[in-house]
Image (tube, rainbow, N blue to C red):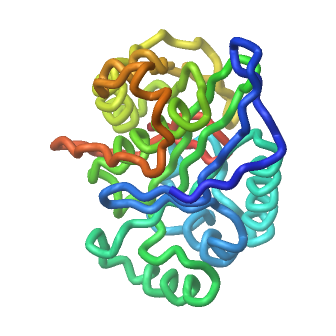
């Protein structure tokens, strides 16, 4: 994990300020999470996968909390906003790359590899994006993710969730992390429930008529994992953590039979 320290600071619940630290890159067993920006994922590359008419876009965006991009300018503006949110410490958004042995046969990914050459050090296929959307006053964050369809069913949702939960609780000293999915998104429900159960979290309830889209409103199912639940589930305790500085993220251990499109909460989120 490569971290950058910044001037912005959060307030510790006991009044002790702590530096806000976002890692530029996080590695797991099968994935690389790299800060999403125009420097790491060129606009043209991201547009190919987020555009209206991209392969499987109707399925990817069915439960998403964002609309497919109509023009490259939409993607450019999106990336500019993501960069601002990172700099302002509102949200940390990462591009998800599959490591070499996780390749697909998607012909578009050959173009991705060419785009990446010389533009950034993020090799491998672009899987999607993920994020943590922060509420510093409440010491909490919301997970967000969308994945391209060729990468559904590989347990990537849980693997990146484990990495971002460690970031949230061990490095950013947050108290709570949430995730949500829209009613009807069964793939996201199964994905979220697997990692929420693994890390000792819970289903908090249903937010009625919470999400407006296309002239309609829908329900949102909310889940949370607390820092105490996470540390109990991972066999850690405060005495141990006080003497440690996280240097890299643990990868989630995959389980069987996952299917997925995710959406939780964030600028790029789509239902888990």
Q: Is residue 42 left or right of residue 220?
A: right
Quarter of the rendering occupied by the C terminus: top left
Considering depth in this image, is 87 or 9 the residue closer to the camera?
9
Q: Quadrant of residue 142?
A: top right
Residue 221: where, in percent of width, then height? 49, 20
Q: Is residue 185 above or below residue 155?
A: above
Q: Is residue 69 above or below residue 206?
A: below
Q: Residue at x 55, y 67 (%)?
A: 49
Up the image or down, 165 lies above or below 149; here it is: above
Identify the residue shown where x is 55% and y is 20%.
Answer: 176
Labels in figure, total:
0
Residue 180 image offset from top left, x and y in percent: 51, 27
**Residue drawn where x is 22% and y is 45% of the image:** 254
Name the residue rendered at 63%, 72% in the picture: 41
**Residue 119 location, x and y as percent?**
64, 83
- Name the foreground residue: 216 vs 96: 96
């Amino acid at each position: 994990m490569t971290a950058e320290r910044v001037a912005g600071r959060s307030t510790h619940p006991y009044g002790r300020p702590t530096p806000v630290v976002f890692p530029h890159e996080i590695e797991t067993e099968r994935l690389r999470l790299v800060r999403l920006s125009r420097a790491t994922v060129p606009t043209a590359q991201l547009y190919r996968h987020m555009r209206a008419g991209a392969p499987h876009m109707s399925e990817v965006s069915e439960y998403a909390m964002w609309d497919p991009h109509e023009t490259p300018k939409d993607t450019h503006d999106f990336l500019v906003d993501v960069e601002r949110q990172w700099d302002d410490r509102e949200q940390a958004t990462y591009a998800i790359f599959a490591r070499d042995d996780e390749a697909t046969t998607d012909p578009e990914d050959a173009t991705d590899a060419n785009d990446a050459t010389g533009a950034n050090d993020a090799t491998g296929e672009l899987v999607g994006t993920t994020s943590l959307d922060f509420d510093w006053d409440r010491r909490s964050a919301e997970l967000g993710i969308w994945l391209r369809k060729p990468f559904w069913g590989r347990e990537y949702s849980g693997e990146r969730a484990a990495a971002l939960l460690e970031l949230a609780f061990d490095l950013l000293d947050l108290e709570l992390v949430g995730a949500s999915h829209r009613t009807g998104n069964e793939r996201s429900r199964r994905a979220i429930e697997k990692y929420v159960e693994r890390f000792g979290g819970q289903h908090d309830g249903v937010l009625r008529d919470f999400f407006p889209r296309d002239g309609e409103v829908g329900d949102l199912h909310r889940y949370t994992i607390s820092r105490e639940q996470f540390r109990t589930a991972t066999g850690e305790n405060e005495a141990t953590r006080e003497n440690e500085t996280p240097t890299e993220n643990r990868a989630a251990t995959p389980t069987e039979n996952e299917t997925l499109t995710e959406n939780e909460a964030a600028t790029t989120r789509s239902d888990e």
